Image (tube, rainbow, N blue to C red):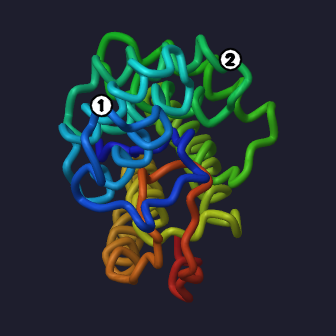
């Protein structure tokens, strides 16, 4: 499964103005500055350095939900699922009413072959909070439903996600299109699945228009829905 560095909790952060290295001695940085530095490192694919920066932010501000969620994003992007789950769980303990953190924890749990069932109450609780953009959360729900062998219900969730006008980032839309194809394939519609996969490849080639930072729930982009997406 492609990881969604979904928690999404850094939705309002931008990496603009952040250099690739510390602007001054690391010991002189505040928690907020270490967090911003981590966001900049994450945007450049330097996930280990991003994690180090988020950890330094937490040394200065223990229990800070935003830095914990960002640490989960960095760990998940680096392929350390267990460390990501631990970071997201700590973020959720610090901010239990944040639906984005619940969604990201659910997403990480869905990638664990032993713990994926723990994701259901998290994503359903997040959806009850009427989050925006709802499409991110519906995609997570769809993956849960696929895990439960409920391909028809998953297809409904994925199509609802694609219909959300707030789900504009091409990379995320391409991911949801691939998930839609997976659902169609399980339902025996090979031709429909191939159309979704082909459309996903086309959408993935569009510029995202992101300003940088940790890819998160709510961190949208400017690209419009492609005219061919309706085939899914």
Looking at the image, which is closer to me, 119 or 219? Answer: 219
Say whether residue 123 is left or right of residue 104: right
Which residue is tagged 2?
96
Q: CA distance from mark 1 to mark 2?
A: 31 Å
User: Where is residue 54 drawn, in percent x and y?
Assistant: 36, 32
20 relative to 162 in the view: left or right? left
Q: Secondary structure at mark 1?
A: helix
Residue 99: horizontal and vertical position, in percent? 68, 32
Residue found 35% across the figure and 48% down from its top: 37
Q: Which mark is residue 17?
A: none
Query: What residue did someone put label 1 on?
Result: 27
Nearer the observer, 85 or 135: 85
Q: Residues within 10 Å of mark 2 (few under 14, many from 20)?
A: few
Q: Residue at (59%, 78%) from the top-left corner? A: 230
Give the answer, above or below, for where 98 lies relative to 166.
Answer: above
Question: x and y percent of residue 9 in the render?
Answer: 56, 39
**Residue in the foreground of this view, choosing between 77 and 192:** 77
Q: Which quadrant of the view contains residue 5?
A: top left
In the rendered view, does 209 fall on the left or right side of 198?
right
Q: Residue at x 39, y 82 (%)?
A: 207
User: Residue at left 53%, top 39%?
Assistant: 140
Which mark sits nearer the N-terminus, 1 or 2? 1
């Amino acid at each position: 499964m492609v990881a969604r560095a979904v928690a999404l909790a850094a939705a309002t952060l931008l990496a603009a103005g952040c250099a690739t290295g510390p602007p001054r001695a690391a010991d002189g940085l505040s928690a907020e500055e270490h967090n911003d530095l981590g966001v900049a490192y994450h945007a450049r694919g330097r996930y280990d350095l991003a994690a180090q920066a988020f950890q330094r932010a937490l040394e200065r501000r223990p229990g800070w939900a935003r830095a914990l969620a960002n640490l989960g994003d960095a760990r998940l992007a680096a392929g350390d699922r267990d460390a990501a789950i631990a970071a997201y769980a700590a973020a959720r303990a610090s901010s239990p009413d944040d639906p984005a953190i619940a969604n990201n924890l659910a997403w990480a749990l869905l990638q664990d072959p032993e713990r994926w069932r723990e994701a259901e109450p998290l994503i359903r609780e997040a959806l009850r909070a009427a989050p925006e953009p709802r499409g991110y959360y519906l995609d997570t729900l769809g993956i849960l439903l696929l895990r439960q062998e409920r391909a028809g219900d998953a297809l409904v969730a994925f199509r609802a996600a694609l219909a959300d006008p707030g789900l504009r980032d091409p990379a995320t839309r391409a991911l949801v299109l691939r998930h839609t194809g997976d659902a169609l394939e399980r339902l025996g519609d090979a031709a429909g699945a191939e159309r979704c996969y082909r459309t996903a490849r086309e959408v993935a080639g569009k510029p995202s228009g992101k300003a940088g930072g940790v890819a998160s729930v709510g961190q949208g982009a400017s690209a419009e829905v492609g005219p061919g997406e309706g085939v899914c």
